[in-house]
Amino acid sequence: MAAHKGHKKDSNVKDLLSKVSAKKHDPHREGLEDDLSRPASVTVTHVTDDLKAPITRTFLEYLFGALRHDFMSLCQELLADLKIVHHDLNDLCTRASSVEDGGDAR
C-alpha cells in the first residue's frame, strides 16, 4: 500500500511538472521581452506544499532531467537561429564585396 501511495505522489509530481513545461518559452509568441524579464523558476516549496510530500531523490532527478531537457531544447533553438544569422551575414558580405568590385548588388 505504501508503494502505491509513493507512486501516486510521483505521478502528481509529473503532472505538475508537465503543466510547468507546457508554459515553456515560445519564440513565435509576441511579448518576448516580457518572457525574458520574468524569472523562469518554480520554487520547490510550492510544488511540495501542493503535494504535501517531502522532496525525494526521485523527484529531484525528474526535476533536473526535465530542466536539462528544456535547457537543451532552448540551446538547439538558439543554435538554429545563429546558423540562420550566420548565413544571412555571409550573404550580405558577399553582396557588399560584389558591389565593391563593380558588380550588381542584386
Image (tube, rainbow, N blue to C red):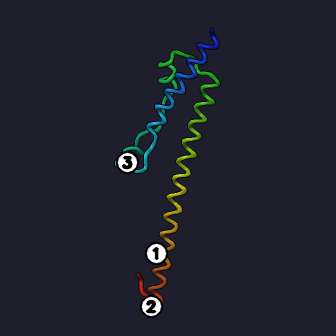
Question: Gap between marks 3 and 1, in whole Å?
Answer: 28 Å
Which residue in the structure is indicated by mark 1? 92
The quarter of the rendered structure image containing the N terminus is top right
The quarter of the rendered structure image containing the C terminus is bottom left
Which residue in the structure is indicated by mark 2? 102
Which residue is found at the position 35% from the left and 47% from the top?
A: 31
Which residue is found at the position 46% from the left and 87% from the top?
A: 100
Mark 3 vs mark 1: in front: 3
Identify the secondary structure beneath mark 1.
helix
* Pointer 1 local density, CA inside 10 Å: few below 14, some 14–19, many at least 20: few
Identify the secondary structure beneath mark 2.
loop
Q: Which amino acid does label 2 sit on?
A: Gly
Q: Is residue 56 left or right of residue 50?
A: right
Query: 29 or 99, which is in the foreground?
Result: 29
Which residue is found at the position 45% from the left and 89% from the top?
A: 103
Identify the secondary structure beneath mark 3.
loop
* Pointer 2 local density, CA inside 10 Å: few below 14, some 14–19, many at least 20: few
Disc nearer the start of the sequence (3/1)? 3
Disc nearer the start of the sequence (1/2)? 1
Which residue in the structure is indicated by mark 3? 29
Which residue is found at the position 46% from the left and 80% from the top?
A: 95
Name above or below for residue 84 compared with residue 13.
Answer: below
- Residue 13, how many percent across, how many down? 54, 24
- Residue 10, how many percent across, how many down? 58, 22
Q: Which amino acid does label 1 sit on?
A: Leu
Disc nearer the start of the sequence (2/3)? 3
Name above or below for residue 28 compared with residue 98.
Answer: above
Q: Which amino acid does label 3 sit on?
A: Arg
- Residue 78, how many percent across, how many down? 52, 54
